[in-house]
Structures are given as C-alpha cells and as structure tokens.
Image (tube, rainbow, N blue to C red):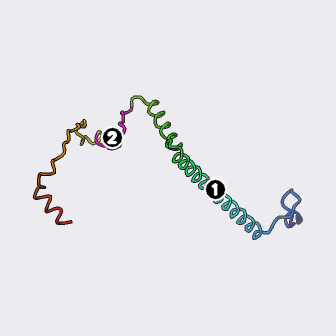
Amino acid sequence: MHDPRLTSSYAAGYGRAAAPGWLARLAGGLIRMLLAVVALLFTVGLLFALTMIVLVSLLAAWLTGRRASPAAQWAHWRDSARRRWPGAAKRSATPRADANQATGSGAGHVQDVAWRELPPSQPAPESAKRADALH
C-alpha cells in the first residue's frame, strides 16, 4: 500500500509546505549576505568611533596642555602591570637606556662634561675648512 504522506508537499509533522531547494538556497544566501553587511557596518562604525575618540582626545590635550587621555590610560596600565609583577626587571625612563641595558652596550652611566666656548680669534682647523668647501 502507498503512504500519501511521503509524496505530499507538507513538511514532516509541521503542516507547512516545504520550500523548494532553490528557494531555500536563495534565502540562505540572502541571509548570509545580510549578516556580512551588518558585520561590515558594525566594524566600520566601531573604527570610526575609535578614530573620533582618539582625535577629540588629542585635540583636547593640545588645547588644554594636558597629557592625552589614551596616553595617560596606557601609562596607568603599564604602571599597574609593573606593580603587579614587582620581581620584573626595572626599566628606565627612556627606550635607549633600556636597549643599552639589555645589550650591554651602554657605558653603565652617563657623565656630563664641561663645555667651553672657543674664542672667535682662533682660526678654524684645516679639516673644517675642507668640509665647508665640499658643501
């Protein structure tokens, strides 16, 4: 005997007509495209908002003479991390000193030297005259 439910256009047990295969693929493709466009718009909007926040912060810092808030926040996070790991290597205030300390190329300390002005009556050395002639 033949079962009429196997050949009917109704989905199993739901009482609705099943969509043809090409229509389901079309609807799925449209939904994927819609979600991709929404994700793209969200990403672009987020980048735009971030850019505007940074620009306004820099403009406010320039007008008020204070440190920019992203830079202040970054310094706060860095200081918090240093407090959290007190056994970490101590860093200096400048990247060059850090690099010298890491590579061992630095002299260990900086010594200030006294300077003096040369009197204008002394003639320039011969090497300086040749260097000036080349330029």
Q: Nearer the viewer, residue 110 or 131?
A: 131
- Dot 2 lies on which element? helix
Rendered residue at 39%/29% (across/down): 87
**Could you tell me the amino acid type at mark 2?**
Asp
The dot on residue 98 is 2
Disc 2 versus disc 1: distance between alpha carbons?
A: 39 Å
For the C terminus, the quadrant is bottom left
The dot on residue 2 is none
On the image, the x and y values in percent for residue 128 come to 15, 58
Which residue was labeled with disc 1?
A: 45
Rendered residue at 35%/41% (across/down): 94
> In this picture, which residue range is highlighted in magenta?
88-100
Q: Nearer the viewer, residue 73 or 7?
A: 73
**Farthest residue in the front direction?**
121
**Residue 10 falls within the magenta-colored stretch:** no
**Could you tell me the amino acid type at mark 1?**
Gly
Rendered residue at 76%/68% (across/down): 21
On the image, the x and y values in percent for residue 68 come to 51, 44
**Residue 99 falls within the magenta-colored stretch:** yes
